[in-house]
Amino acid sequence: MFALTWGYAALHPRLYANARSRGLYQRNHYHAFSKSVIIREPCLRRGKPHNTMTLELPIEVTVRIDFQDYWRATSAYMLRHFKLKWLIVSAGVYLVLFFYLNFTHTYRGQTYPLLIPLAALGFLYAMLYLNTKMLFAGKKFLQHPVRFVFSSEGVNAVAPGSPGETSWSTIPKAFELKDDFLIFYTAERMYTIPKRCFAGDEELKRFRSMLAAHLGSKAKLWT
């Protein structure tokens, strides 16, 4: 900020008018006693800086799984269901009771019905195994390496015959298991991402953060 006398302003009217028209100076006030005009340098409107969007770097993972990987992930996911856990516990309890009654001879009736929960559990696992084998055989793109690209837009599976790109908003759920991540691109179909495919702990941490940020409560992750 600097001051020019009134006489200087009067002697240079064109210079002063020019400056005022271009917005270079701003007349603040005129003092009657000192007859001086306070002229300021250009003023900028100050405010809070605009929020800048943080770029989310994509995560690329190349996955090659076999049926054992797919079966491990599927069976671990099924164990999360309460009904299956209840059936396993019931089968174990009735099996112990079956052996106890047969060895102690405290019950003279038929004890074979106590094995029904165990038989049901075996039948269920057999059906689950066959169904998983059929699903794995039907997903031809899993027979080759699949490059998964996880970005702010969603999940892109790059491989011949793969479902392609799926936005985060259409992904119904995701789970973190002991050895794998399960990303469901439909209500019943999923991608199996083994943890061994990530570069290290830092990339795993970034991946968890990405799932939590885009899926929220739909992602069941380890804490």
Image (cartoon, rainbow, N blue to C red):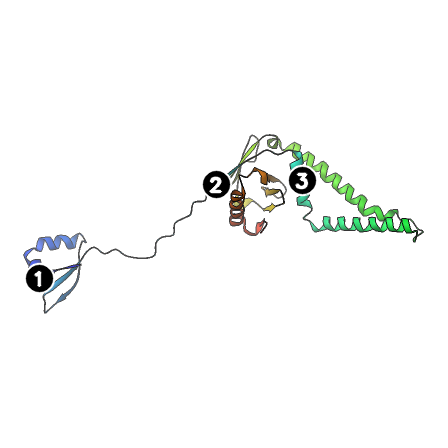
The alpha-carbon separation of the residues under discs 2 and 1 comes to 63 Å
Report the side of 157 relative to 34 (left or right).
Answer: right
Secondary structure type for disc 3: helix
What type is the residue that disc 1 sits on? Trp
Query: Could you classify mark 3 by the number of other residues whose Cα lies within 10 Å: few (under 14), some (14-19), or many (20 or more)?
Result: few
Q: Nearer the viewer, residue 138 or 222?
A: 222
Percent position (x, y) of residue 85? 72, 50
| Earlier sequence position, callout 1 versus callout 3 | 1
What type is the residue that disc 2 sits on? Pro
Residue drawn where x is 70% and y is 37% of the image: 131
Query: Could you classify mark 1 by the number of other residues whose Cα lies within 10 Å: few (under 14), some (14-19), or many (20 or more)?
Result: some
Q: Which label was assigned to residue 58?
A: 2
* Mark 3, residue position: 72
Q: Nearer the viewer, mark 1 or mark 3?
A: 3
Classify residue 73 by image quadrant. Answer: top right
Q: Nearer the viewer, mark 2 or mark 1?
A: 2
* Mark 1, residue position: 6
| Earlier sequence position, callout 2 versus callout 1 | 1
Percent position (x, y) of residue 151? 49, 42
Q: Are marks 3 and 2 in contact (CB under 8 Å)?
A: no
Classify residue 48 by image quadrant. Answer: bottom left
Percent position (x, y) of residue 65? 62, 34
Residue drawn where x is 57% and y is 37% of the image: 197
